[in-house]
Each structure stands twice: as structure tokens, then as C-alpha cells.
Amino acid sequence: MLRSHNRKYNEIRPINITRNYIKYAEGSTLMQMGDSKIICTASVEEKVPLFLRGSKKGWISAEYSMIPRANQIRNIRDSIKGKINGRSSEIQRLIGRSLRSVVDLFKLEERTIWIDCDVIQADGGTRTAAIIGSFVALYDALSYLKSEGKIEEMPITDYIGAISAGIVDGEMLLDLDFKEDSNAQVDMNMVMTEKGEIVEIQGTAEGKPFSKGNMQELVKLAELGIKDIIKIEKKLLK
């Protein structure tokens, strides 16, 4: 199968992460994965939600949205519709869960890190790309807090990566772009730490169910991609 960027079945799209992309945010990135582009910012707020007050524990929360012309056709802004659509709500919860899984929230103390992910161009895999870009932005925001003496040590407990894998025309592929995703018989997203611990797996079939064997093969394929992604993160953040 001929793939974008002349990739093999087990190769991820080119990744380019520009740090400090937004002047005012404590941490920010322009995350580019293939033709998908996302601006990720991490903003520090010196308070926590009501349910955490007095707990000596911090929080990380995420918001995710697409600008109206990120896709091939114009989307209506959520602010115009008066509510967040279900897909955006589900993705922002995924981003928050993923980042909280690799942060010691007690070391963050009673403050919140707000993660904002704005997709400016979508060509598949935006939820997984948003996790990657957000992790780097979060890392920089936490580094800022440490440099300012507001926290004693970095609360990051592990690196984290995310990637999609799927079955298209009977072939297993890593990191699906929009065209591949639109024609996939099976579509899976996985979030995993450097230690190989799974944070989340989202897998769905289109048309007919898939076997446990296929599931295991897709997990192995996604793990290969995540290892490559974490290598890129470590090189960038060293």
C-alpha cells in the first residue's frame, strides 16, 4: 500500500515539535505530525478545583478544539453551538487522564495546569498528536515552576507517548492519516509510558468484529511507534 510520506506499514509520520511557540504561556508547542498541526499550551493557575482544596494535591485539566477550517470542510465553533461536541469532550478527558498518569500531583502542590489543544490543521491522529505536544508543553511549564522556586523537584514520573494503529484493506498500519482512518476496518488509539505501562486503549471495529489476535498485533505495532515517539521527546527535552 502506498502511504503518505512514503512510509512502511510500521513507520510513524514525520514529527516536528516547536517549543515556546506562544509567548505568554508557561509551556507551549506547535506539534506537527505529518500534515496534522496542533498548538498546545500549558498554563499555570495558583489554585485547584473545589474537590481538591486542602488536599495538598494539584490537578491537570485539558481542553481540545478545532478551528473552523482545520478540516476539508468548515466546522461550526462550539461557542456558536452553545455546547462542546461529544468528540471534543471525550478527547480532552483522554488528554487530561494521560498527563495525570505521569505526574506526581502532590509534588505539583495546590495548583492547576491547564492544557489547551487547538487543532489548526487535521489529517488524522489529532488526539494522539495532542497528547505528545501537550506532554512537552507540560514539561516546560513544570520546568518553569521549578526554576521559579515554586516546586522543589520535577513531578514528572515517566515519559508518555500516544499513537494510532489500525487495519486498512486487511493490512495492519501504524499511525493512520485521515484517508487511512476513513477506510479502516479497525481503528485503535493507544497511550503508553516509557516503562511499557498502558494508560489507555481505544479500539473499534467498523463493519465486523476483529479477533483477540488482531488486537494483540495492533498493540505490538502501536508500542513500536510509541517507543520512537518517546525517543524524540527525550532528545528534545534532554
Image (cartoon, rainbow, N blue to C red):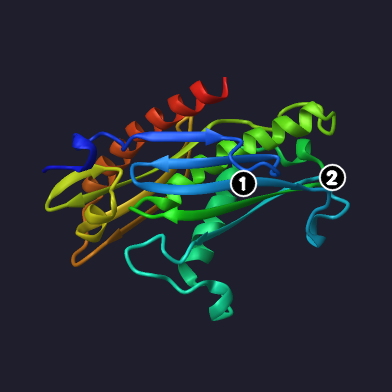
Identified at 62% across, 46% down, the residue is 41
Local SS, label 2: loop
Picture coordinates of residue 233 (x, y %)? 49, 28
Amino acid beneath label 1:
Thr
Q: Residues within 10 Å of mark 2 (few under 14, many from 20)?
A: some
Disc 1 target residue: 41
Q: Quadrant of the N terminus?
A: top left
Amino acid beneath label 2:
Lys
Q: Is residue 41 left or right of residue 7?
A: right
Disc 2 target residue: 56
Instruction: List the single residue furthest toward the right.
Output: 54
Q: Residues within 10 Å of mark 1 (few under 14, many from 20)?
A: many
Q: Quadrant of the C terminus?
A: top right
Residue 226 vs residue 182, the one in the foreground: 182
Q: Earlier in the sequence, mark 1 or mark 2?
A: 1
Picture coordinates of residue 50 (x, y %)? 82, 61
- State whether residue 148 is above or below residue 166: above
